[in-house]
Image (cartoon, rainbow, N blue to C red):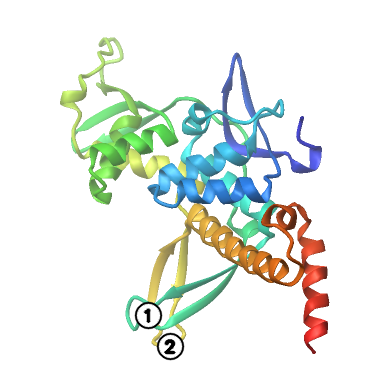
Amino acid sequence: MKPSYESQVLLPRGWWIGDRWEQRVGFRAVADCEEESLLEQIDAMLPFERDSALLASYVLGPEGVPLTPSQVRELSIGDRETLLLWLRRSMLGNTIQCVLRCPACAEKIELQLNVDDLIVARELNPHFHYEDVVQLDDERLLVTFHIPTGADLEEAIRVASGVPEKAVVALAQRCVEEVIRKTDDPAAPQVPTSPDDWPQSLFPEISARIEKLDPQAELKLDLACPACGHHFEDFVDPGGFLLRELTARQRLRYREVHQLAKAYHWSEADILRMSPRKRQLYLELLAADDE
């Protein structure tokens, strides 16, 4: 079944489907029992695996067909983060309540974030490949690169054994496709260089360019502790937010099942087949009887 118009959104970048560039996606509703099974599945996963599983479970392509795991892995990191934010809004609303700790004094900081404020404007003319001239000391390099995908991130983390600093370099290395040394002689032939000859100082430069081209990939919050005044940055993790909130909702659902089964002797399956509104009405009746 195709998603309704209201459930469709446009990705900041998109991906190739056959011979066309596509940016439309939609979301499907997931039953309570499916959600519980998914949470059990992703509980022990690494963050990038968790995010891929969430997106493959809920996101529909432009024809209303669920995205395959390989399609999810080929989405840019920014598209994946955007989808997780949209998914969170469609399931739980626009407002995110979160609690952080000040790294200086450990004071608890309560924040209210709006999903709409976290979504970066969509790129109007995305490209599959980008070219840029990078000046390194006395060398000018014409670099062809692409925006990192989920698959690039997975491989970079694997190569770096989970060390963040190494993963950043490994990710940039995977995104660089060709490097040509530029000369002042326009008649000189352009000869691609070997990856073994690429200078290590190139990759921080490419990382900075990628960050500007895919700003949704890494969202930072600039914060100040109200207790000690310490200024610090923290990163937004949409997949982590969503997992914690879905887990909290699942625990609430268990309490509802427990109360209704204890009072009415209904089975768990019968209770979960009820709509959340219907369960809440019965719980309100039970609460009124206790008054």
Q: Is residue 242 above or below residue 54?
A: below
Q: Are marks 1 and 2 in contact (CB under 8 Å)?
A: no
- Helix, strand or loop at mark 2: loop
Give the residue drawn at x 74%, y 72%. Answer: 263
Which of the 4 quarters of the picture holds residue 17?
A: top right
- Where does label 2 land, which residue? 227
> Dot 1: within a 10 Å radius of its alpha carbon, few (fewer than 14), some, or many (20 or more) residues?
few
Judge left or right: residue 178 versus residue 285: left
Judge left or right: residue 209 versus residue 8: left
- Residue 213 in the image: state x and y as whole percent: 48, 40
- Residue 93 in the image: state x and y as whole percent: 69, 60
> In the rendered structure, which amino acid carries the disc numbered 2?
Ala
Quarter of the C terminus within the rendering: bottom right
- Residue 150 in the image: state x and y as whole percent: 43, 36
> Dot 2: within a 10 Å radius of its alpha carbon, few (fewer than 14), some, or many (20 or more) residues?
few
Q: Is residue 198 above or below residue 45?
A: above
- Where does label 1 land, which residue? 230
Give the residue drawn at x 27%, y 38%. Answer: 158
> In the rendered structure, which amino acid carries the disc numbered 1?
His
Q: Is residue 20 visible?
A: yes
What is the spatial separation of the Cα atoms under label 1 and label 2, in whole angstroms?
A: 8 Å
Give the residue drawn at x 75%, y 52%. Answer: 273
Quarter of the N terminus within the rendering: top right
Picture mark count: 2
Q: Is residue 115 above or below residue 28?
A: below
Q: Nearer the viewer, residue 150 or 265?
A: 265
